[in-house]
Image: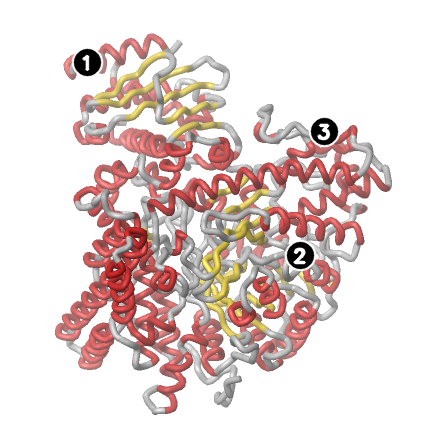
């Protein structure tokens, strides 16, 4: 346990007013418009066109490609941030990764800068270069097309391209990882290079041809890491030039100091808090040179950076205000990039950030309270900046962490109205030990991206591999392997006509047949794409920052990490559970309708007076997930259990198991928008509920809702979940924070894994939709990540508006006002 | 219905002949047809208009022609009702339109009607994903070829005001 030395853990004396640098940087951040950055695409394409050697191993080819780019990556200083390095060449950049989905931008090259929704700036010259030089090279070479060519356009790929069954994220990213930065900070990147060189030398000296792959891996690590050092030197050179050119002595001194830091780190060991922060950030930049900017999560920064902070404070080199400023600079650097989103994808992914997750608090490897002064500094920075990225998450162990800490996190959430998210150590550590991780390693978990869990730097979970639309197999069970949206096409197995079934148990079996078949298809495609990644996208740079690859001599993508898995998340969980409840209760128990009658209404989208009558009956009388109804509790438990068993029975291409999770980004809106009516009374086109959250309006009592979700937590959800709760704001924040913390404590003791909040009313969100200009910085939690409300698509805005709002004082749902 | 225009297009081997066609038909009329596809509810003629203008502009506009200078691509367009089956082949810096099926297309696009195809490829708020989600349009093959085609169609659309 680390003693807290701060006089006020709220650090109230530090405000943006007395932190002018952060205030200015924050203001610049909000005024910037995203620009598409083609720098990486340009240099890797040029490298592959002119210099690629097909005789090289995949690891070495990738390392050379990345290093070539890093040697040429521009060194720029867009503002007075104290840290050097940017992920892109733009102040707020959307980098292009042609190995994945960059070519989806092609139709929009002429219009992306001017589109109405979330424009991303692109110069004519850059558009021209993409059209004529870069994109043509990649037409047959991205992950998706290589998979298609190699495996003959398999059924699983066609299902993915149909978009309405599941999303195979490997076509778009490889990322989603938490590196281990401590060794890099202690030894410097040069130290890691030396380690790799020594291992290469030992293996080469053994003279065994079987060592070739390992030798190549260690060689690749050195090549890739040298790219990071080269880029740091460029940053130093540019800072030195800016120091010489500066008229203001203070500015000159600032750039000179930045230059000196870049001459020291990340090549050499970090000696100070500031060097450690900048070293870590330059390595993050290097990681983004290799892999796409999606959920590359820095991890437990309050733990990793604490030794440097404490030493500097003790030795008088640093004060709390300076630490806050440096952490703020890091937060704003992490927010320097966005994803390139083509207009066509706005419906599914609009408004999403890049979700680099930072994890605070919780317990240490020995199970003791890990909250320290830096935890509170990082919470204060999160509160002051209130920006979308990084995605800050607070771990809480109700036995070990203090009540004061829980209240402080609660207060930060109330003040920002949305961040950070809360994670339950007990349930999440249980989830990871259930996956074979040692207790010490599980205790050192960090959040990846939205809500996914991984032992820091030891666990490569590819956590967004599959996004499964659970409504698809339900519809296929209702319509004998077909879905209304895909017409008469036979998608899944021909199962029994539901109207012939005699019990709910028989329908449950039919549903499982369709579910298992569809998940089998998604896993098959993930395996195909995984093997393409192994050849096309090894990650020697990221591997060097992990625990495992440097011991095994094996890249992450080959299974080099200590723990390996693939993650599958699920869309429409609550809607499917409620549909199962409705079928069981109204068809088989109460016999209110026959299955044929129910199907007829579902097919007809509950149209006409009779349809509306049926729909209202289903909504008002069928048991609902999020309540104490025994049928709902049983069905939710059975579905979670079945998915766990099913995924765990599959071993992935890296030798790990599949892990189910429940978070949806904005897919619950997009996929809900195109799905047909469902048996619980949901009409066609209505959004699904997000993540693990009960259907809006279905759970009127907060305590029952939290208990119903919480009892599903722990071992059966190793990938994590997102539960969204909306609270009515109260005037007395301190008083509300106390109740808030008590509710968290109770929910976690009941087993809840995670919860995130929006502290806002229906009316406020309706007003924000109507008058976006009044709410330019309004940040909301979507399903695992934060977004600016104004950036979301209309369906997603409506979903946020209609989410159940609870009054914390009485624990009751607030009635939804009549919507225009 | 679509055969005559294909015959005309494939007959346009020489730039001079192209100019003859333009002068006969009237470029203003061709652009007007194309523009009407965006304005009217019925867009059945969209594919015909698009391919005709695309073909002409590749011949007369060297800047536009750069799109296909070193491009080899084979496209198959089919309407769901079977009324339209058109192939488009880009090779050796030329564009060729063929009635019926082409061999080994890089991408096959099956569309419900002209309006859905227009929305899919070129509408002011292009909606490739939405069209696919709603199953207005189905594709089979390499979508990157479709993205390139979409860009060329969009460029053509953006030329309308310059000539209007």
> Residue A490: which disc?
none
Nearer-the-camera pick, A523 or A194 = A194
Residue A324 seen: yes
- Tell me if mark 2 has few (under 14), some (14-19) or many (20+) residues whose alpha carbon lies within 10 angstroms of its own: many
Q: Quadrant of residue A529?
A: top left
Residue A447 horizontal side relative to residue A802, left or right: left
First in sequence: mark 2 or mark 3? Answer: 3
- Label 3 resides on the chain identified as A
* In the depicted structure, whether residue A818 falls above or below residue A498: below
Q: Chain of mark 2?
A: A
- The local secondary structure at tag 1 comes to loop
Q: Residue at x 33, y 71 (%)?
A: A184
Circles 1 and 2 on the same chain:
no
Name the mark nearer the viewer: 2 or 3: 3
Whether the residues at callouts 2 and 3 have beta carbons within 8 Å, the answer is no
Residue A501 pos. (x, y %): 79, 32
Q: Is residue A69 shown above or below A199?
A: above
Q: CA distance from mark 1 to mark 2?
A: 65 Å
Mark in front: 3 vs 1: 3
Q: Which mark is residue A496?
A: 3
Q: Give the CA distance from mark 2 to mark 3.
A: 37 Å
Residues at marks 3 and 1, CA–CA distance in whole angstroms: 59 Å
Crowding at mark 3 (Cα within 10 Å: few <14, some 14-19, many 20+):
some
Identify the residue position indicated by label 2 in the image.
A804
- State the mark number for residue B13: 1
Numbered disc 3: secondary structure: loop
Q: Quadrant of residue A310?
A: bottom left
- Residue A679 versus residue A548: which sits nearer the camera? A548
Can you give x and y, in whole percent of width and height, for residue A107 in the image?
Answer: 34, 36
Callouts 2 and 3 on one subunit: yes
């Amino acid at each position: 346990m680390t003693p807290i030395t701060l006089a006020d853990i709220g650090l109230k004396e530090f405000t943006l007013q007395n932190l002018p640098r952060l205030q200015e940087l924050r203001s610049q951040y909000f005024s910037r418009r995203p620009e598409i950055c083609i720098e990486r695409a340009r240099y890797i394409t040029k490298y592959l066109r002119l210099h690629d050697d097909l005789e090289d191993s995949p690891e070495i080819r990738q390392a050379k490609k990345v290093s070539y780019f890093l040697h040429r990556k521009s060194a720029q200083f867009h503002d007075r941030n104290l840290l050097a390095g940017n992920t892109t060449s733009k102040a707020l950049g959307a980098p292009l990764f042609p190995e994945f989905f960059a070519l989806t931008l092609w139709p929009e090259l002429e219009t992306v800068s001017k589109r109405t929704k979330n424009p991303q700036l692109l110069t004519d010259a850059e558009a021209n270069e993409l059209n004529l030089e870069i994109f043509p090279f990649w037409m047959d070479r991205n992950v998706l097309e290589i998979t298609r060519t190699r495996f003959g356009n398999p059924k699983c790929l066609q299902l993915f391209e149909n978009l309405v069954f599941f999303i195979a994220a490997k076509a778009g990213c490889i990322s989603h990882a938490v590196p281990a930065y401590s060794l890099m900070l202690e030894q410097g990147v040069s130290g890691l290079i030396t380690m790799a060189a020594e291992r290469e030398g030992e293996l080469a000296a053994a003279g065994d041809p079987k060592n070739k792959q390992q030798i190549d891996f260690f060689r690749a690590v050195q090549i890739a890491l040298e790219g990071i050092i080269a880029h740091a030197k460029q940053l130093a050179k540019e800072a030195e030039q800016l120091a010489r050119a500066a008229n203001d002595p203070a500015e000159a001194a600032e750039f000179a100091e930045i230059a000196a830091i870049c001459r020291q780190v990340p090549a050499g060991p970090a000696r100070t808090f500031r060097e450690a922060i900048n070293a870590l950030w330059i390595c993050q930049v290097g990681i983004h040179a290799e892999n796409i900017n999606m959920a590359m999560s820095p991890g437990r920064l309050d733990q990793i950076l604490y030794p440097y902070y404490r030493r500097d404070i003790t030795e008088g080199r640093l004060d709390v205000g300076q630490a806050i400023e440096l952490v703020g600079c890091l937060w704003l650097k992490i927010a320097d990039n966005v994803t390139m989103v083509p207009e066509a994808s706005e419906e599914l992914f609009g408004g999403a950030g890049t979700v680099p997750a930072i994890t605070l608090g919780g317990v240490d490897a020995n199970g003791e309270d890990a909250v320290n002064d830096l935890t509170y500094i990082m919470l204060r920075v999160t509160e002051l900046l209130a920006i979308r990225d990084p995605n800050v998450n607070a771990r809480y162990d109700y036995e070990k962490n203090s009540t004061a800490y829980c209240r402080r996190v609660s207060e930060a959430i109330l003040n920002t109205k949305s961040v950070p998210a809360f994670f339950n150590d007990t349930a999440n550590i249980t989830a990871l030990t259930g996956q074979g991780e040692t207790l010490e390693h599980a205790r050192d978990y960090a959040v990846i991206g939205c809500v996914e869990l991984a032992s820091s730097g030891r666990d490569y979970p590819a956590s967004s591999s599959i996004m499964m639309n659970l409504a698809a197999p339900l519809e296929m069970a209702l319509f004998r392997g077909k879905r209304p949206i895909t017409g008469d096409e036979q998608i899944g197995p021909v199962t029994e006509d539901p109207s012939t079934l005699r019990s709910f148990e028989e329908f449950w079996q039919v549903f499982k047949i369709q579910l298992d078949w569809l998940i089998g298809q998604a896993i098959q495609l993930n395996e195909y794409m995984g093997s393409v990644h192994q050849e096309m996208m090894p990650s020697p740079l990221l591997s060097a920052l992990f625990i495992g690859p440097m011991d095994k001599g094996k890249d992450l993508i080959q299974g080099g990490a200590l723990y390996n898995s693939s993650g599958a998340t699920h869309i429409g969980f609550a809607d499917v559970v409620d549909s199962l409840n409705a079928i069981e209760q109204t068809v088989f128990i109460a016999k209110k309708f026959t299955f044929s009658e129910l199907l007829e209404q579902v097919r007809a989208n509950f149209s006409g007076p009779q349809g509306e009558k049926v729909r209202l009956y289903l909504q008002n009388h069928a048991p609902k997930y999020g309540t104490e109804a025994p049928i709902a509790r049983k069905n939710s438990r059975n579905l979670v259990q079945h998915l766990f068993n099913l995924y765990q029975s599959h071993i992935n291409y890296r030798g790990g198991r599949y892990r189910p999770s429940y978070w949806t980004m904005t897919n619950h809106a997009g996929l809900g928008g195109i799905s047909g009516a469902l048996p619980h009374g949901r009409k066609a086109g209505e959004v699904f509920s997000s993540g693990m959250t009960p259907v809006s309006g279905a759970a009127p009592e907060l305590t029952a809702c939290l208990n119903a979700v919480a009892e599903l937590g722990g071992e059966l959800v190793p990938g994590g979940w997102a539960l969204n709760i909306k609270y009515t704001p109260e005037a007395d924040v301190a008083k509300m924070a106390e109740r808030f913390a008590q509710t968290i404590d109770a929910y976690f003791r009941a087993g809840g894994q995670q919860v995130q909040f929006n502290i806002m009313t229906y009316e406020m969100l309706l007003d924000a939709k109507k008058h976006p200009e009044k709410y330019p910085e309004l940040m909301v939690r979507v399903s695992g990540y934060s977004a600016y409300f104004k950036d979301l698509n209309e369906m997603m805005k409506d979903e946020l508006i209609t989410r159940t709002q609870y009054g914390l004082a009485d624990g009751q749902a607030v009635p939804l006002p009549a919507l225009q | 219905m679509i055969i005559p225009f294909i015959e005309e297009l494939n007959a346009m081997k020489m730039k001079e002949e192209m100019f003859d066609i333009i002068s006969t038909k009237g470029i203003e009329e061709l652009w007007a047809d194309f523009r009407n596809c965006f304005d009217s509810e019925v867009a059945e003629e969209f594919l015909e208009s698009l391919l005709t203008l695309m073909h002409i502009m590749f011949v007369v506009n060297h800047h536009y022609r750069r799109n296909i200078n070193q491009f080899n691509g084979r496209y198959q367009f089919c309407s769901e009702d079977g009324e339209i089956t058109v192939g488009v082949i880009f090779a050796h810096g030329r564009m060729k339109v063929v009635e019926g099926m082409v061999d080994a297309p890089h991408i096959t696009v099956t569309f419900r009607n002209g309006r859905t195809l227009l929305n899919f490829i070129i509408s002011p708020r292009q909606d490739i994903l939405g069209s696919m989600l709603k199953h207005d349009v189905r594709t089979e093959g390499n979508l990157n070829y479709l993205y390139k085609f979409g860009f060329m169609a969009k460029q053509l659309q953006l030329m309308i005001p310059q000539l209007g």
